[in-house]
Image (tube, grey):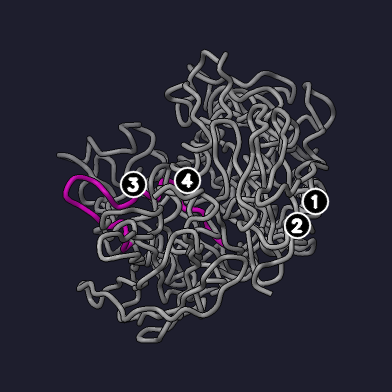
């Protein structure tokens, strides 16, 4: 069917289309779908859902009303199970029909894995909705005066704050700049200025490296960061300023200097012997990607579960309780945790962590790291959000990739060819469209992280403003990796962990600070950017347009890579486009006959507010 993108039938999991947003088991859920009249005379619209694994079609949906050329239909599903999948069948004639699912519109029937998804699981805490996250790598953020008096361990190679960061080879993990928790506390006002509401700390446990993902204990804060008292002080100060604080936990592995591993290595009779995957005589062992310093946990051990993730005396629970009071956890390499050969404890570990967190404080937030496709592995009964690169970060990098860049970035920049905005839409839809809506609204949108190079270093010069705009207007929680707002560079994960130049220790571009602050203010002022529906309107090689909508407003977003004077879509795509008010970018939207047009410039990003079509 040759139908403009802006007039495609639409449904998603937002409140405009799904009610209630918090369904109960065996309860009824109302679903709406909008279909533009240009699609033709609709004979019937049905919903295909399942009951305990058996699929069936509903009775025909009822047509509610017509607004601005759109027919609105309503039907319902029953929550026969905690997790229900569904898709729509649109029949135009006996010979022409279409399926609408989470990733698009199709003539042929589609697999269940691509359906819309809804569940009865507990929703994320209210404070996570509308959040802006700020990620800090403690060794590189800020250094307090107390750091000068701390004796360094033998592994650490002391560095000055202005020294260059090693990206590969010897010394990469041993470079020690001495950032600490008090240093972070002294700069909380910077986070507030940016509009951040969550401070996410990479690991703070004692370890044998600057990244601390090789914990030697989970029972104390690294003295090099200031110890337990410094964490308590930081969390208390953050809470006083309205910030939440999240920690980072490695449920997949410990360090090879961890007390549990040291006790069991070479000692099969040790109680902790069952905590890891040891070979004969406990001399050899499995580890994360074969890295000897990161031995992998064996979650068949009940005792490991009790000590680490299960119950109010566990590691997971300890740091959520007073005197520390963390507000949640990000679980490192959640996609690999509990998986090895024939063993699969992945979901058990995740749900146990969530259960423990609920016992201690139900108002906490759990994020899982899934570097690739996560939608068909996360339903919401454990992880309430994912740090994933597949649905936002990688497509964005590919669209705004600098064609003259010869380097590859290991995590995000394989295959240096640019993609089009139309391909970005396709990738985002495939990797994001099948998440349950509440998960999709809380997934992290990152330009880069401590595990990747910096976006600025690989993208078209000047494109970070466009990328940040999309980061704050796509569904999900925008996550700023400390230093992005200073325009810092980095060609891989290690090299991107640059000390923040608070006192001008290295060149930086402060213009992005106000950009992030302004985008945060817009997100806070316009709820449609938080949980509103997302509907694509236009996608070409160089430009894209989409709308975020709720019952009170429509937010129109246009982003361009190159100059494109042909951004045009039907007037019926938006209600009352003549009333568009620019919020960001100062661009002029024109209505010409039955078309909405915008003439862009290179690397353009615009936001307008329009009336809602639903008032």
How busy is the neighbourhood of tag 4: few (under 14 within 10 Å), some, or many (20 plus)? some
Is 581 situated left or right of 311 in this image?
Answer: right
> Badges 2 and 1: C-beta atoms under 8 Å apart?
yes
Q: What is the distance, in whole Å, between disc 2 and disc 1 at their CAs?
A: 7 Å
Is 449 situated left or right of 103 in this image?
Answer: right
Q: Is residue 87 visible to us here?
A: no
Residue at label 1? 583
> Badges 4 and 1: C-beta atoms under 8 Å apart?
no
Quick one: quadrant of the C terminus?
bottom right
Circle nearer the N terminus (4, 3): 3
> Badges 4 and 3: C-beta atoms under 8 Å apart?
no
How busy is the neighbourhood of tag 3: few (under 14 within 10 Å), some, or many (20 plus)? some
Residue at label 4? 428
Is 142 situated left or right of 496 in this image?
Answer: right
Circle nearer the N terminus (1, 3): 3
Residue at label 2? 609
Foreground mark, 2 or 4? Answer: 2
Circle nearer the N terminus (2, 4): 4
- Secondary structure of the residue carrying tag 4 is helix
Residue at image position (72%, 34%) is: 600
Residue at image position (47%, 69%) is: 33
Q: Residue 613: horizontal and vertical position, in percent?
A: 66, 68
- Secondary structure of the residue carrying tag 3 is loop
What stretch of residues is rendered in magenta? 328-348
Circle nearer the N terminus (2, 1): 1
Q: What is the distance, in whole Å, between disc 3 and disc 2 at their CAs?
A: 42 Å
- Secondary structure of the residue carrying tag 2 is strand
**Does the magenta segment cover residue 344?**
yes
With respect to residue 358, does 468 lie above or below?
above
**Does the magenta segment cover residue 337?**
yes
Q: Nearer the viewer, residue 454 or 476?
A: 476
Q: Is residue 237 visible to us here?
A: yes
């Amino acid at each position: 069917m040759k139908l403009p993108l802006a007039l495609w039938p639409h449904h998603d999991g937002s409140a405009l289309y799904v009610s209630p947003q918090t369904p109960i088991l065996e309860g009824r859920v109302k679903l709406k779908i909008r279909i533009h009249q240009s699609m033709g005379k609709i004979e019937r619209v049905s919903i295909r859902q399942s009951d305990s694994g058996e699929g069936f079609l509903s009775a025909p949906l009822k047509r509610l009303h017509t607004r601005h050329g759109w027919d609105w239909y309503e039907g319902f599903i029953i929550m026969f199970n905690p997790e229900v999948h569904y898709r729509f069948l649109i029949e135009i004639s006996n010979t022409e029909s279409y399926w609408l699912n989470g990733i698009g519109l199709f003539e042929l029937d589609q697999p269940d894995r691509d359906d819309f998804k809804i569940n009865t699981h507990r929703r994320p805490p209210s404070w996570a909705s509308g959040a802006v996250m700020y990620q800090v790598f403690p060794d590189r953020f800020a250094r307090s005066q107390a750091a000068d008096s701390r004796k360094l361990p033998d592994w650490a190679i002391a560095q000055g704050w202005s020294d260059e960061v090693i990206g590969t080879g010897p010394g990469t993990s041993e470079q020690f700049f001495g950032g600490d928790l008090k240093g972070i506390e002294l700069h909380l006002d910077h986070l507030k200025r940016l509009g951040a509401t969550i401070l996410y700390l990479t690991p703070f446990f004692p370890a044998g490296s600057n990244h601390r993902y090789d914990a030697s204990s989970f029972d104390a804060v690294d003295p090099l960061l200031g110890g337990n008292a410094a964490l308590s002080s930081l969390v208390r100060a953050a809470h006083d300023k309205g910030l939440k604080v999240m920690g980072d936990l490695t449920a997949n592995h410990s360090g090879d200097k961890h007390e549990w591993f040291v006790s069991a290595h070479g000692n099969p009779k040790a109680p902790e012997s069952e905590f890891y995957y040891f070979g004969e005589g406990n001399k050899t062992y499995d580890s994360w990607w074969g890295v000897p310093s990161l031995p992998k946990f064996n979650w068949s051990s009940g005792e490991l579960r009790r000590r680490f993730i299960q119950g109010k005396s566990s590691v997971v629970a300890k740091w959520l309780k007073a005197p520390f009071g963390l507000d949640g956890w990000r679980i490192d390499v959640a996609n690999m945790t509990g998986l090895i050969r024939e063993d699969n404890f992945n979901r058990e570990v995740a749900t146990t962590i969530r259960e423990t967190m609920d016992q201690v404080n139900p108002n906490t937030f759990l994020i899982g790291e899934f570097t690739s496709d996560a939608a068909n592995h996360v339903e919401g009964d454990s992880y309430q959000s994912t740090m994933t690169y597949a649905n936002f970060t990688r497509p964005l990098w590919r669209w705004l990739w600098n064609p003259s860049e010869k380097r590859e970035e290991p995590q995000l920049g394989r295959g240096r060819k640019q993609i089009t905005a139309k391909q970005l839409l396709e990738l985002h839809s495939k990797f994001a469209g099948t998440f349950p809506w509440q998960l999709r609204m809380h997934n992290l949108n990152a330009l880069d992280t401590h595990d990747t190079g910096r976006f600025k270093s690989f993208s078209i010069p000047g494109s970070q403003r466009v990328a940040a705009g999309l980061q704050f207007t796509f569904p999900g929680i925008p996550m700023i990796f400390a230093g992005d707002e200073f325009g810092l560079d980095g060609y891989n994960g290690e090299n991107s962990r640059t000390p923040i130049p608070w006192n001008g220790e290295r060149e930086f571009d402060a213009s992005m600070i106000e950009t992030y602050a302004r985008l945060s203010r817009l997100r806070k002022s316009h709820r449609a950017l938080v949980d509103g529906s997302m509907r694509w309107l236009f996608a070409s090689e160089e430009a894209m347009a989409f709308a975020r909508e709720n019952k009170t407003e429509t937010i129109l977003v246009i982003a361009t890579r190159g100059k494109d004077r042909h951004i045009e879509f039907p007037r019926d795509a938006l209600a009352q486009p003549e009333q568009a008010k620019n919020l960001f970018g100062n661009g002029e939207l024109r209505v010409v006959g039955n078309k909405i047009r915008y003439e862009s410039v290179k690397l353009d990003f615009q936001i307008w507010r329009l009336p809602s079509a639903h008032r």
